[in-house]
Image (cartoon, rainbow, N blue to C red):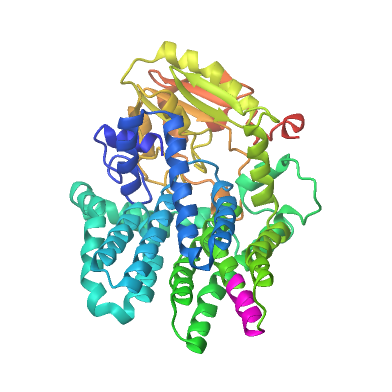
């Protein structure tokens, strides 16, 4: 979300010039954002904060019919689930969810007021959400059906017109890139080719962590003072809790509406709950803590409102009013916060505590790598030291406009890519379609990566992720043609921190070795224990 928008600024086309698995909307918005606020990590983080706050305040708006206290509680739950999975990274998912939630807000308003313009705004926001993440189409479609079905004679036309306008980035992208590359990059690549190398067991394993990134994080986990289940057990429990709550909110709202009749509160729960249910597939295909939080951040604040609604209604039916009812307004928030403390404390409270301690100076900052005003932070000192040592060597050998490829040391397993190196060397031209490297795509036979390597000037290969281990096809070595292209066309000119980074430069006849041939391949390194506490 730093490098791709920069390429868009330079006239590069997603799905033609570089792999991008999602819609063009987020890239174009960020490209404009960087033109105004600068191409910096700080600008990207601020944009991410804006997206996260848009989610929080949308859920505040949706739960406001139950009073300010309930809405604030929903906002607190949303903040815990939104801010903790990836920190402040401006991912397209958060933008899409924020836009979809605000589309639901305007659809509910239109339903309650009959305002045609509110329907049009809802459609506009929904279409724009799809330009960020087309895979959210099920959730957006179900939301509009739930909100507008009984008003379809009034709502259909403005919603469709608004959605068509909101999808403008996608229409432009289809014209510029062509339908074939767009379908291939946004549908076939993520759904067919990538899925076997990224999916995780569903439900998660009870006794071990399936996701490589979480295994790294839990090698030396942040401080947590309270008793809790093991990290893998929490994921197992959280997985089922996410599914149950995503179904419970709209189902309960539907039942209440059938029993008591339609009213604005129940309709709000049903419509917004349908949106939360519609994004559930995001958790099912890769149930790690990030994807579970990405679903829970919609349904769980609504679940708090549902509990509050049921409790307060029961008290009023029992003719208990006044202070008792006002006290029980916090019941829903209390139940959800307690549930999070039981099933997912490591992935919510613990990481919020960690980031808070860093913010107030109780813990040191991560490790800074800086070059010509561009900054990037790394959680591991050896990774940072390797980059700091490599930077002057690549600077001395390269010239602006030279072609650079960054990848894994063993290019038959492209499990991850350290795109931050492209960001730090902004004057060098990314020489590959696979700036983001994924298993089953870049490492596949005939992917084109080998031909791109033959045309590059420099290759930086890292062993940051050579310890990547997941129960999917990412563990299998694919085509060796990419490693052979390194051996035939490049010489190894730099090795840093026990081969954590390898710097290759084009040379006549090649050096005969690739990154996969270098001894001492470095496993994933946890943060030193004294820094984690």
* Residue found at the very far left of the displayed protein: 175
Between 485 and 268, the one nearer to me in the picture: 268
**In the image, is residue 316 part of the stretch drawn in magenta?**
yes
Q: Residue at image x 52%, y 83%? A: 256
Q: Position of residue 244 (x, y in %)?
A: 60, 72
- Residue 234 in sight from this viewpoint: yes
Q: Main secondary structure of the magenta part?
A: helix
| Rendered-image quadrant of the C terminus | top right
Residue appearing at x 27%, y 69% in the figure: 115
Which quadrant would residue 96 be assigned to in this image?
bottom left
Query: Is residue 494 visible to us here?
Result: no
Along the viewing direction, whichever of 223 and 313 lies nearer the viewer: 313
- Looking at the rendering, the stretch of residues picked out in magenta corresponds to 308-318
Estimate the x, y position of residue 237 in percent, counting from the top left: 69, 64
Location of the N terminus by quadrant is top left
Across and down, in percent, residue 311 comes to 64, 75
500, 58: nearer the viewer: 58
Residue 381: horizontal and vertical position, in percent?
A: 64, 25
In the rendered image, the vertical position of residue 318 relative to residue 160, given as above or below: below
23 on left or right of 86: left
Looking at the picture, does residue 80 appear above or below residue 332? Answer: above
Q: In the figure, is residue 321 to the left or right of 41?
A: right
Nearest to the observer: residue 205 or residue 296? 296
Report the residue at 55% width, 33% height from top.
516
> Which quarter of the picture shows residue 526?
top right
Q: Tell me, yes or no, whether the highlighted magenta stretch contains residue 186.
A: no
User: Residue visible at 76% across and 45% down?
Assistant: 224
Q: Quadrant of residue 97?
A: bottom left
């Amino acid at each position: 979300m730093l490098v791709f928008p920069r390429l868009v600024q330079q006239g590069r086309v997603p799905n033609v010039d570089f792999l991008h698995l999602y819609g063009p909307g987020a890239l174009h918005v960020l490209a404009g954002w960087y033109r105004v606020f600068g191409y910096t990590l700080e600008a990207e983080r601020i944009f991410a904060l804006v997206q996260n706050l848009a989610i929080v305040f949308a859920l505040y708006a949706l739960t406001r019919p139950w009073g300010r206290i309930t809405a604030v509680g929903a906002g607190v739950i949303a903040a815990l689930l939104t801010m903790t999975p990836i920190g402040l990274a401006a991912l397209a998912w958060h933008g899409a969810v924020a836009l979809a939630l605000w589309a639901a807000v305007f659809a509910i308003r239109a339903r309650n007021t009959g305002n045609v313009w509110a329907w049009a705004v809802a459609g506009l926001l929904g279409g724009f959400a799809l330009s960020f993440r087309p895979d959210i189409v099920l959730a957006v479609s179900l939301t509009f059906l739930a909100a507008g079905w009984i008003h379809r004679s009034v709502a259909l036309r403005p919603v469709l017109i608004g959605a068509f306008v909101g999808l403008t980035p996608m229409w432009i992208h289809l014209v510029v890139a062509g339908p074939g590359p767009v379908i291939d990059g946004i549908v076939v690549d993520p759904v067919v080719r990538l899925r076997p190398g990224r999916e995780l067991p569903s439900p998660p394993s009870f006794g071990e962590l399936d996701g490589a990134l979480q295994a790294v994080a839990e090698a030396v986990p942040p401080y947590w003072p309270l008793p809790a289940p093991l990290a893998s057990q929490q994921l197992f429990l959280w997985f089922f809790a996410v599914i149950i709550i995503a179904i419970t909110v709209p189902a309960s709202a539907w039942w209440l509406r059938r029993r008591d009749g339609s009213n604005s509160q129940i309709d709000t729960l049903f419509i917004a709950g349908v949106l939360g249910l519609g994004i559930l597939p995001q958790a099912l295909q890769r149930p790690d803590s990030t994807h579970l939080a990405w679903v829970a951040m919609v349904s769980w604040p609504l679940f708090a409102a549902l509990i509050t609604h049921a409790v307060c209604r029961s008290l009023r039916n029992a003719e208990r009013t006044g202070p008792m009812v006002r006290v029980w307004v916090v019941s829903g928030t209390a139940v959800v916060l307690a549930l999070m403390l039981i099933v997912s404390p490591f992935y919510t409270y613990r990481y919020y505590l960690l980031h808070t301690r860093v913010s107030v100076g109780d813990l040191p900052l991560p490790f800074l790598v800086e070059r010509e005003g561009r900054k990037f932070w790394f959680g591991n000192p050896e990774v940072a030291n390797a980059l700091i040592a490599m930077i002057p060597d690549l600077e001395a050998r390269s010239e602006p406009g030279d072609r650079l490829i960054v990848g894994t040391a063993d290019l038959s397993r492209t499990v991850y890519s350290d795109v931050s190196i492209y960001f730090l060397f902004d004057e060098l031209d990314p020489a590959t379609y696979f700036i983001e490297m994924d298993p089953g795509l870049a490492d596949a036979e005939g992917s084109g990566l080998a031909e791109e390597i033959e045309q590059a000037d420099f290759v930086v290969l890292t062993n940051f992720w050579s310890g990547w281990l997941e129960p999917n096809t990412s563990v299998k070595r694919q085509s060796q043609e990419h490693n052979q292209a390194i051996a035939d066309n490049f010489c190894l000119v730099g090795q840093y921190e026990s081969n954590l980074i390898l710097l290759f430069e084009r040379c006549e006849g090649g050096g005969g070795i690739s990154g996969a041939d270098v001894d001492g391949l470095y496993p994933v390194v946890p943060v030193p224990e004294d820094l984690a506490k």
